[in-house]
Image (tube, rainbow, N blue to C red):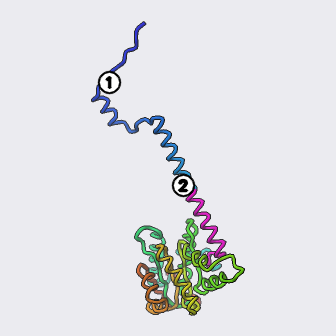
Amino acid sequence: MNKPVLLTVPRGMLAKVKAHAKHSAFTPDDYLAFQQREAKADYQRQQAQLAAERHQRDVKNLLERSGVQDIYLSATLESYQVYRPEQKAAISTCREYLQSFGQHGAVKNMVFCGSTGTGKNHMASAICNALNASGKSAVVATAFEIQMKARAARRHDSRLTEEKVIASFANVDLLVLDEIELGSTQDNDCKIVNAVIDQRVTQGKGSIVLTNMKIDELANHMGERIADRLLSSFYLVECYWPSYRTNKPVAV
């Protein structure tokens, strides 16, 4: 019976095979390590998804609603009726803000200044609707609402604390702060809104401010420190055209 012959592969040929091989074979230990890495990565992905879902539920339970008014629940940037060049520019700015939202180096904040009936709420709500539809958390709240929730949290029978209320508004992906000039001017109440803005800026989260004031008046109203932080990275959308409610022109 012939003995098996062991073939010797030249080293040069073996080197060429290894150089041109797309994948090297797993050893049993390598394959086990690979499986463990994949299982860990899959677990981390699942935990991240669960954390995101918990965050969304917590926001919904604590704030009770997105804050978007009923008439704007289906609002989109496309459904905003444009009839002036300034409005085209405003919608273009909104799209740019939305498309880059959350990206590194993107502009964080927006300020809508202008008179009533010019569509500030429609545009801001459209941004919120788009972000909420994508799985992010976006909330509309008035300054007065934030202050009232903080006041209610101070009651002895409240399940919340003032700190939790501030955190709930500070931690959402986007906060639209409406009617900032109509909030209470009492010292404690002003500090609540400022604390929310301050925490959001510190965390690098975006905020949109809606106001009937001009930008310099808004800066004076918020105070130098908060205004300086909020307005260090922002788009300014000035809405100074006739009210759509009382003067419905033909769209262009």
Name the residue at the left extreme.
Answer: 12
Q: Position of residue 71 (x, y in %)?
A: 63, 80
**Residue annotated with mark 1:** 9
Q: Amino acid at mark 1?
A: Val
- The span picked out in magenta is 47-68
**Residue annotated with mark 2:** 44
Q: Earlier in the sequence, mark 1 or mark 2?
A: 1
Is residue 117 among the parts visible in the rendering? no
Q: Nearer the viewer, mark 1 or mark 2?
A: 2
Callout 1: helix, strand or loop? loop
Q: Position of residue 47 (x, y in %)?
A: 57, 57
Q: Quadrant of residue 177?
A: bottom right
Picture layout, residue 19 above or below residue 168: above
Q: Residues within 10 Å of mark 1 (few under 14, many from 20)?
A: few
Q: Position of residue 121 (x, y in %)?
A: 56, 82
* Dot label at residue 72: none
From the viewer's perspective, tell me whether residue 174 is left or right of residue 11. right
Q: Position of residue 238 (x, y in %)?
A: 46, 86
In depth, the one of 40 and 128 nearer the eye is 40
Q: CA distance from mark 1 to mark 2?
A: 45 Å
Name the residue at the top extreme.
Answer: 1
In depth, the one of 244 and 251 nearer the eye is 244
Q: Amino acid at mark 2?
A: Gln
Secondary structure, magenta segment, majority class: helix
Tell me if residue 62 is in the magenta stretch. Answer: yes
Q: Residue at coordinates 57% horizontally, 55% vertically from top-left?
A: 46
Q: Residues within 10 Å of mark 2 (few under 14, many from 20)?
A: few
Q: Residue at coordinates 61% horizontally, 76% vertically from top-left?
A: 164
